Structures are given as structure tokens and as C-alpha cells.
């Protein structure tokens, strides 16, 4: 039994915040604004995992009105999300993701992100694809006002 899920997340880019992407701290002049550490990539993956099993979305499970999640490391959110998936008897087959941002170039950090995500989701780095694109300077991402992440996941029912 297979289930597919998709997720998308947006955050503003502002000065005075750290830029966390895929669980990795990226040196940059701006960071993502949010209630948690605002890691768009991990949030998109969380929503894809939840979506695959029709479990709602990240806002349902980790509300941004809760002080419990203030500035929380999104790796914790991803770990807790994956526990929900495992509790339903499923495991990740693979994830394919895309980051949309103008700057900085994230290629030097992709393998570190893959390692972090694969570690949490108990797969190999070949099962976690991280792609990136600019928007050719168009729109809010092009003006560096914000960034977007898309994720698609495939889950498989575990054999017991
Ligand atoms: Mg988010």
C-alpha cells in the first residue's frame, strides 16, 4: 500500500533572523520570519507527510499560537511528525523537494540538509532529493522578500 503527499510552505525573509533550511543554519544577511525557527523546507516536508495520510497539516499539530513551539527547532517538528506516520504503520520511501529563493546559493549546503533529513526520516540521502531554483527575479522570492519550499513524499505501509 502506497500513499503520496505534497506540501508547500512560505516564510518572509527579514534582517535580524537566522536562516535555517533543511535543518542547517545557512550564513546569510537575512533569515526567515516565523513562530518556530521558520525552516520552510522542513515545514513543507512535514505537510507532505501529514497529507499523505490525511492527518491535517502542520498548523493543526503544532499551532503557532502555542508557546510550546515558540522558536522551536523544526527538526523536532519533523521528528514528531514522522512518529505520527510510523504510528499509522507507514514509512517513507522517498522525498523530492524544491526550494525557491534568489539568494543565497544553497548548493554547498544540500548534502548536509540531506543528511539531517534522511537521519530523522530513517532513509538514505539518496531518498531525499533537494533541488533549488530562483524565480528569475520575479515576485516576492525574486525580490528576496520571502522564500518557498515544495515537497512531495511517497509512503509505504510497513510489513510487520
Ligand atoms: Mg512554516
Image: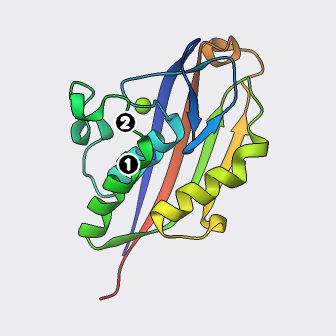
- Ligand 1 quarter of the rendering: top left
Give the label on residue 76, or none: 1
Q: Residues within 10 Å of mark 1 (few under 14, many from 20)?
A: some
In 3D space, how far apart are the residues under numbered discs 1 and 2 (Cα atoms)? 7 Å
| Relative to 2, 129 lies left or right | right
Q: Residues within 10 Å of mark 2 (few under 14, many from 20)?
A: some
Residue 135, percent across and down? Answer: 72, 23
| Relative to 120, 79 lies left or right | left
Q: Determine the secondary structure under disc 2.
A: loop
- Vertical comparison of 154 with 109: above or below: below
Q: Along the line of sight, which residue is nearer the eye, 123 or 98?
A: 123
Circles 1 and 2, Cβ within 8 Å, touching? The answer is yes
The residue under the point 44% across, 40% down is: 43
Using the rendered view, name the quadrant where residue 98 is placed: top right
Using the rendered view, name the quadrant where residue 26 is placed: top right
Q: Which residue is mark 2?
A: 72
Residue 146, percent across and down? Answer: 58, 18
The residue under the point 47% across, 32% down is: 9
Residue 39, percent across and down? Answer: 50, 35
The residue under the point 46% across, 30% down is: 38
The residue under the point 34% across, 71% down is: 90
Q: Determine the secondary structure under disc 1.
A: helix
Residue 120, percent across and down? Answer: 47, 61
Q: Along the line of sight, which residue is nearer the eye, 74 or 151?
A: 74
Amino acid at each position: 500500500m502506497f500513499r503520496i503527499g505534497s506540501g508547500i510552505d512560505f516564510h518572509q525573509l527579514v534582517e535580524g533572523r537566522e536562516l535555517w533550511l533543511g535543518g542547517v543554519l545557512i550564513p546569510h544577511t537575512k533569515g526567515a520570519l516565523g513562530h518556530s525557527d521558520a525552516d520552510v523546507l522542513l515545514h513543507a516536508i512535514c505537510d507532505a507527510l501529514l497529507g499523505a495520510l490525511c492527518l491535517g497539516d502542520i498548523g493543526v499539530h503544532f499551532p503557532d499560537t502555542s508557546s510550546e513551539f515558540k522558536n522551536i527547532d523544526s527538526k523536532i517538528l519533523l521528528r514528531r511528525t514522522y512518529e505520527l506516520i510510523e504510528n499509522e504503520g507507514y514509512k517513507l520511501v522517498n522525498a523530492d523537494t524544491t526550494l525557491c529563493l534568489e539568494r543565497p546559493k544553497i548548493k554547498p549546503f544540500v548534502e548536509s540538509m540531506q543528511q539531517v533529513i534522511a537521519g530523522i526520516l530513517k532513509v538514505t540521502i539518496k531518498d531525499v532529493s533537494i533541488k533549488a531554483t530562483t524565480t528569475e527575479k520575479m515576485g516576492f522570492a525574486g525580490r528576496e522578500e520571502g522564500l518557498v519550499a515544495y515537497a512531495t513524499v511517497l509512503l509505504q505501509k510497513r510489513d510487520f
